[in-house]
Image (spheres, grey):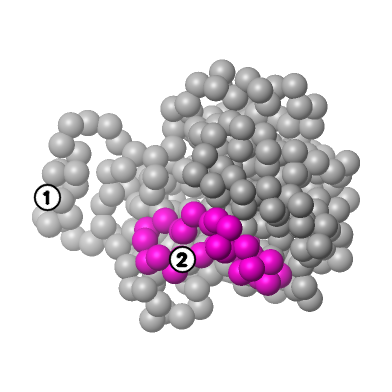
Amino acid sequence: MRIAHIIMAHKNPPQLLRLIERLQHPNFDIFIHIDKKVPLDNFFLLKEKTNITFIKNRVECNWGGNNFFKAIISSVNEVIHLQKNYAFVSLLSGQDYPITTAENIYNYFLQNSNKNFISYDPSRQSNWWKGAVNRYEKYHFTDVHFKWKYVLQTIVNIVLPRRKFPYSFKLFGGRNASWWTITGDCAKYLVDELMHDKKLWDFLKYSWCTDEFMVCSIIMNSKFRHDTVNNNLRYIDWSEGNARPKLLGMADFDHIKQSGMLFARKFDQDIESQILDKIDRDCSLLSSNLA
């Protein structure tokens, strides 16, 4: 069984290298998408690694913009078309980190070989869902480049009627939904459904944070929903109430240890590297207790 890990990165090459080293396993292949805004030369220290591949079709990504979702789907498509029959495709960010050994991660997926692990918020009363409709009903100019674009965005949203999602299926999503591990068959279905859907891409171009609802929505409106677990196996702390999750540090170690997850995020070793050192020391003791 082989697993493809796709890592979306744009900064901190030494931390990305550290993540790659923690993911070393004979049955793991690692693919890295570097934001097109960033020179690849910044990541020259990774080029000597033999089991990593840089995604060729790079996309310029902006926080909250649909281009990030486009970069994800394009990367998955590139991996799937290698025709290596990956049992799983896992999406990580450069600020994720395994909180157990690569062998434990491999064995967990080996024991759950037909399942998809995603996260979505089932409660339509949550704070995420209360603002979710604005992600696609309003126009967002995040990925376009011209002066005063946000002034025009405000005017457009006052003048024009709210947009309607182009398809009638039920939407699924949540603040943890961007990161997931799905079967190779599900990943192939995902790109087959999305890659050539011009109508959908034209609509999503002016939507916001589409990575937080589109993958879940496609999967949960397909036959793969029957083999899908609402748990993406990532420990993520939103307790600060900000638009981005908390940066994890030493004070969070016990919560990470007790989480039963395989990965955690976000980390920044330039701010606090001790937490990663401690995870490295104790990772053989940390293993998922998920059934």
Upstream in the sequence, badge 2 or badge 1? 1
Which residue shows up at 28% across the image and 49% down it?
140
User: In this rendering, does residue 149 appear at all?
Assistant: yes
Magenta residues? 234-260
Badge 2 amino acid: Trp
Instruction: Identify the secondary structure beneath mark 1.
Output: helix
Which residue shows up at 44% across the image and 27% down it?
37
39 versus 59 height, above or below: above
Instruction: Identify the secondary structure beneath mark 2.
Output: loop
**Residue 161, picture quadrant:** bottom left
235 versus 79 height, above or below: below
Pick whichever, 68 or 225, lies toward us: 68
Count neighbours of disc 2 (C-alpha within 10 A) and say few if under 14, some if 14 to 19, many if 20 or more: some
User: In this rendering, does residue 191 appear at all?
Assistant: no
> What is the distance, in whole Å, between disc 2 and disc 1 at their CAs?
32 Å
146 versus 93 height, above or below: above
Pick whichever, 235 or 257, lies toward us: 257
Badge 1 amino acid: Ile
Q: Is residue 204 magenta?
A: no
Residue 257 picture location, percent across and down: 69, 66
Residue 198 picture location, percent across and down: 45, 44
Disc number placed over residue 238 in the picture, else none: 2
Which residue shows up at 50% across the image and 21% down it?
39
Disc number placed over residue 155 in the picture, else none: 1
Q: Are marks 2 and 1 in contact (CB under 8 Å)?
A: no
Horizontal side, residue 57 vs residue 261: left or right: left
